[in-house]
Image (cartoon, grey):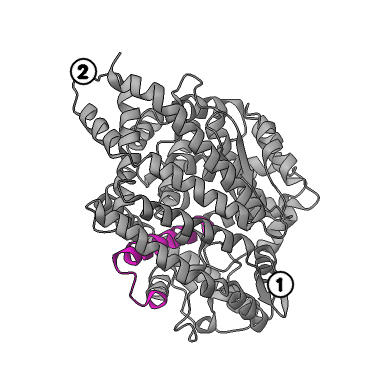
Amino acid sequence: MHPFERFLQNFIPLLEKKFTDVNKASWILETTGSQDAADLRSHLDAELKILLSDVKIYRDLMAWDQDPSLKDPLLKRQLNVLLRSFKQNQASPSLLEEISKKEATLAQSYAAFRADFNGKKVSENEIRDVLKKEKDASLRKMAWESSKQIGEILAPQILALVKCRNQLAISLGYSDFFQMQLDLQEVDRNWLLQLFDAFSKDSEKAFDSVLREIEEALSSRYGVSKKDLGPWSYSEPFGQEDPLDNEDLDHLVQGVDIVKASYLFYQQMGMDVQSILDHSDMLEREGKCQHAFCIHVDKRGDIRTLNNVKSSVKWLETVLHELGHAVYELYFDDSLPWLLREPPHMITTEAMALLAGRQAYRKNSLEKLVGNSKQKWIDIAEKSLRRRQLIFSRWVFVMTSFESELYSNPDQDLNALWWRLVEKYQKIKAPSNRQGKWDWATKYHIGLAPVYYFSYLLGEMFASMLQEAVSGKGKHFEFANPKTGQFLKRKLFSLGNSMSWSSLIEHAVGSPLNYHAWLSEFS
């Protein structure tokens, strides 16, 4: 037996316990927002980071990485995963503990915050409801500004965390945390930025066409000129979603049990999500995180989703999306080592989740999800999906560029940077009264899911490639059927983290990641 194998036998049980304990504490924190949960999560996460910071173990891992006698592919992949995990924790225990504490405090702040709108504390769902339905431009603006109130609270916390993350990255020889994260995720920075630049140029004409359609519709709806359309004219606070037809599309889910419909939908693919739903937290309440996510607590099947379901097509999309993450992890091959029971990168699991979420707008899938008696709204859903894809691509450019600049120079005027990027990519004019504000800090991912957002757009590219692979480039792709389920389980899910994300994509669809299938579908 190779010494690395003996090491795994002793080390993995310790790592598994710490990992599971952190996830359990995170779940309590996100579902309650309590101070005790924040303290517990911070303490346990620091312990996990310290376990992964042992200098002697890291040196042994690097030595084994140079050992030509270590040939088994699964052992080599586990070594690769551990090397990257240890590398990012080669810092002083006090710094690692400080980062854990700041992240837990930030998570608590997000969970507990409720905006003040018209003298009333309101949830994120309520803000979005105003932006979806209200015709009065002044009330829309007031609601949008209310959604930005959290920025003043979070900005100092995020900046302190950014500087700690940069301190960690620089101590490891990186220029900043953004560069470190890409490297540890096996993503080449130059490749990523060049790909996004080419993608932006090749889809610009289609985006401009959609933008003209949107601006004309919004100008007419609110009775203002196009030049007076502000970010509050969109249906959600960041302008990252299609603002047209939202009220009409919500007719699709009237009288529909979204959770039950999603369960039955996955069942038609041969995927049983009941155990996931049994452990999930689906409805909004005070103190609970207002976002949505999926968590695999122990890598042994305790998979949960957190949602805040309301009767809207957006929440149908979100439930399908989070269950997409969940089934990906549900169907890992049982023979995989514990360490490899995870996706190799968020790109691949996002592809599944995004492909699933798209079905909330697809004719074939909607007829299964909501019935075929709502044809009027089903017919407009496909058009909305195209707009959504083009709009969202620009939002990813904003987020990726902003994070790159944030970590490169956190002391610059970040709100001015934020609005420059919004105007450049989304072509939404910056309001005149945002100087000295913290609008950039209101986006959850910047603080608590850093250097992640690019994965969504790469995931959208891969989702279209998967669809082509399953349908044979046919125009009438039917997602909810056993053939699709079998393909995804065999070619994608079962392999876990047994190879790099780029190798997995080639294995699944026969070519490297690219945006040609996406362009063919949406532009």
Figure label count: 2
Amino acid bearing label 1? Lys
Q: Is residue 406 magenta?
A: yes
> Along the line of sight, which residue is nearer the eye, 362 or 459?
459
Query: Circle 1 sits in a helix, a strand or a loop, which is it?
Result: strand
Q: Determine the CA span between mark 1 and mark 2.
A: 63 Å
Residue displayed at 30% across by 23% down? 4
Residue 371 visible in the shown view: yes
Q: Over which residues does the magenta segment extend?
A: 387-416
152 versus 95 height, above or below: below
From the image, tell me which residue sits under label 1. 121
> Along the line of sight, which residue is nearer the eye, 288 or 477?
288
Badge 1: how crowded within 10 Å, few (<14), some, or many (20+)?
few
| Outermost residue, front side | 94
Looking at the image, residue 471 sits to the left or right of residue 183; the answer is right
360 versus 176 height, above or below: above
From the image, tell me which residue sits under label 2. 69
The label number, if any, that marks residue 392 in the structure image: none
Which of the 4 quarters of the picture holds residue 367? top right
257 versus 175 height, above or below: above
Residue displayed at 37% across by 47% down? 515
